[in-house]
Image (tube, rainbow, N blue to C red):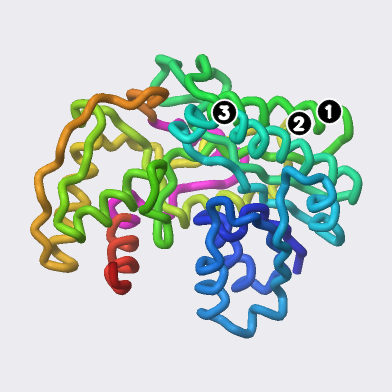
Amino acid sequence: MKTYLITGVAGFIGSHLMAHLLAAGNRVRGIDNFLTGKQANIDSVLAQNPHDAARFDFLRGDIRKPDDCEKAMQGIDVVLHHAAVGSVPWSIQEPILAHECNVTGFLNVLEAAKNHGVKRIVYASSSAVYGDSPLSPNVESQIGAALSPYAASKRCNELYAESYARAYSLELVGLRYFNVFGPRQDPNGAYAAVIPKWLQAMRQKQSCIIYGNGESTRDYCYIDNVVHANLLAASAPLQAPAPVYNIAVGAATSLSDLHKIMSEALAERAAIQVAAPTFAPPRQGDILHSRADISKAQRELGYHAICTVAEGIQNTINFECKNPL
């Protein structure tokens, strides 16, 4: 049994990590300021297994505040850092907020972890750091220019992680996520991810918006793969100071194909006839193509994608269709 701190515990990824860690018998402390996280996510996890509540400790706090980080870090073995402004368009609209949350907040987490002797920090990086790199699939050692403040903030996290590993001997592992999706992902707001936003529109029999011509590709990664990677990264022997790993399926799916997969799965699950998509100009800061080389994570972490895109879409639709719109 270990004691984990999950920053951003009320968020989509954070709440799934919380569920798996509690189910495995660990103690979990969570911190969240509810900028994007929701109390309903925490409540949903605890409602599934009420006896787990005795091993869960919640702190309403903000990683932008050093004192909150110090309080959260007491007695912690491993940190899973997922508190962030996690949207490219949002970071373009509010770059100062993105920097404060993603860079200053991360630095506060590192300082508090150092001060309290935390054994390891696993933190969320992003495929956005690959920017305009022409290489496909993306390999960890070759990145491109940052195309958004979000991308810059995640690259900055990686640099700070490496510097803290070398200067203070902290154990840090960065996970470059590629388009994570799954149950309980928020479909609302201007910065919602494509899969939950499309699923809501499809269930409401509205047309989904495809930015570009539909041929841009992403490496969509179901949430169980991300949880699997975090658990491995929390204990795997480190091959270098502050390594980073691509976490994805390792396959590219175009937006047009994604729309087809979701339409067919929803028709089968709920007998919904999905409307044809509407096309719009590409968004600023978006990458045209993205696919991960996951061989480094396979080799050094023992990671493999335990769920395909199609399986993940089916799982997500089955979960969401149980809930009213």
Quadrant of the snapshot with the N terminus: bottom right
> 274 or 281, which lies in front?
281
Check if mark 2's residue and mark 1's residue have beta carbons within 8 Å.
yes
Q: Is residue 134 above or below residue 274?
A: above
Q: CA distance from mark 1 to mark 3?
A: 29 Å
Disc 2: which residue: 241
- For image coordinates 74% across by 29% down, the residue present is 160
| Residue 231 x %, y % | 62, 55
The nearer-to-camera label among 1 and 3 is: 3
Q: Earlier in the sequence, mark 2 or mark 1?
A: 1
Q: CA distance from mark 3 to mark 2?
A: 29 Å
Q: Is residue 248 above or below residue 16?
A: above
Disc 1: which residue: 166
Type of the residue with mark 1: Arg
Type of the residue with mark 3: Pro
- For image coordinates 44% across by 46% down, the residue present is 180
| Residue 236 x %, y % | 69, 47
Quadrant for residue 102, please give it.
top right
Q: Is residue 293 magenta?
A: yes
Residue numbers of the magenta segment: 291-312
Residue 95: give its label.
3
